[in-house]
Amino acid sequence: MLSSTVRVAGDLDLAEECTQDAYVRALEVWTRDGIPRSPGAWLTTTARHLALDRHRRAAVLRGKVPLLVEDARAAPPADAHLDAEGTVGDGGIPDDRLRLVFTCCHPALAREAQVALTLRLVCGLSTAEIAHAFLVSETTMAARVTRAKKKIAAARIPYRVPAGHELAERLDAVLTVLHLVLTTGHTAPTGDRLHRDDLVERAVALTRSLLTLMPDERELRALLALALLGQARAVTRLDAEGSFVPLEDQDRRLWDAALVAEGEQLVLEALRGGRPGRFALQAAVAALHTSASSVAATDWHEVVALYDLLLRVWPSPVVGLNRAVAVAFRDGPQAGLLMLDALAAADGEALARYHYLPAARADLLRRLGRRVEAGAAYAQALALCESQPERTFLERRLAEVAPYPA
């Protein structure tokens, strides 16, 4: 709805207001007249009409004849259509959303603002969820989103998929956005659900659509592979009680073989033809996990080597944490613990809100038999964790190492 409405509104804040007002109007009209045959189409049409009405009123006040700004960003093409899902555009749902993705990822905006704005507007993530992904406060993230909206309005950035020669300069930002959507969908940072199918499916659809525009981009294939390999394991990541299940305890026989096969083929294609990028390296790690019969049978030497390469092209404390865990599986928990402690000393501020750091330390301490320290680390992870399935898992592990001093 927002992606379609913004093309008429020509303004992000106005489009959001009209989208929200359409829902309010639906509550009134549908209660009286019943739910329409195509609720999505009804909502989108109403939101667009509200935007048109706002433009008309503004035009009258200004005493001008034009009802809308006559440029590509203010009106859909003449042959635009409204489909059953309520999306208006000349290329279907993914294309309408891609227009907004590329608008938000305009090079005039700072990278953090590009990603945050896209996650908020296109993918529907809350400000709190985005702040969690960036490891910053919710207030800081809200300010970034507001500044980005103002910059788009001031710079009159058009709402369109850029021309072919412009695609490449925005691709990395778009890939970053889609990757964060996948990460959030694969492991939701808050709430009762571990896996958010809506976010994962949206990111996959956008990635596939973008791949049709840029079929030679290996990093796009890699990102799609990463998404599919994650989807393949989704069914085994929760137990019957709704608790998170770590990789080592998942029943690999239940993984989706078709998704694994497609993902692993995409990984091979992404690794051909030159130095691999950050998404190809991540997808290669995921493929090593899906191709192994167990955690013990995983080629941890290769996993660590891939993380070494990934740290060169994408230095990140989160990548460093994942590498430390891989080292623990390769060389033992003591080696991994030393790396985690070094990481905490070097990047403690960046990881201060990241519950996976104390959770990883707790697991290694548990394996070493250091129950008191493990319990304290599990308690620290629980204080930071806002995902109920992960909290349930951490609480179980904490009970295993209890009692321990407060």
Image: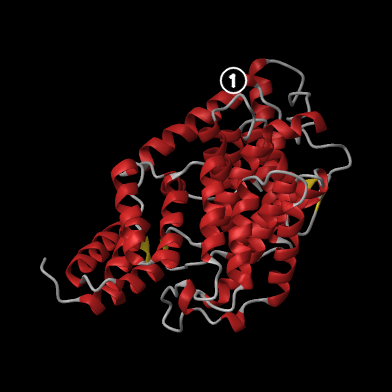
Left/right placement of residue 349 relative to residue 67 reads left
Q: Residue at x 34, y 42 (%)?
A: 347
Left/right placement of residue 202 relative to residue 376 reads right
Q: Give the vertical position of 267 relative to 103 (above or below).
A: below
Q: Is residue 122 among what the camera can see?
A: no
Camera-nearest residue between 279 and 383: 279
Q: Residue furthest right?
A: 79
Q: Residue at x 17, y 69 (%)?
A: 372
Task: Count how many numbered circles sit on residues in the image.
Answer: 1
Camera-nearest residue between 292 and 334: 334
Q: Residue furthest top?
A: 63
Q: Where is residue 113 drawn, in percent x and y? A: 52, 33
Camera-nearest residue between 92 and 207: 207
Q: Where is residue 91 drawn, in percent x and y? A: 82, 47
Residue indicated by mark 1: 154
Q: Where is residue 320 drawn, in percent x and y? A: 43, 50
Q: Where is residue 371 drawn, in percent x and y? A: 20, 72
Residue 191 appears in which quarter of the rendering?
Answer: bottom left
Q: Residue at x 60, y 74 (%)?
A: 292
Left/right placement of residue 346 relative to residue 161 reads left
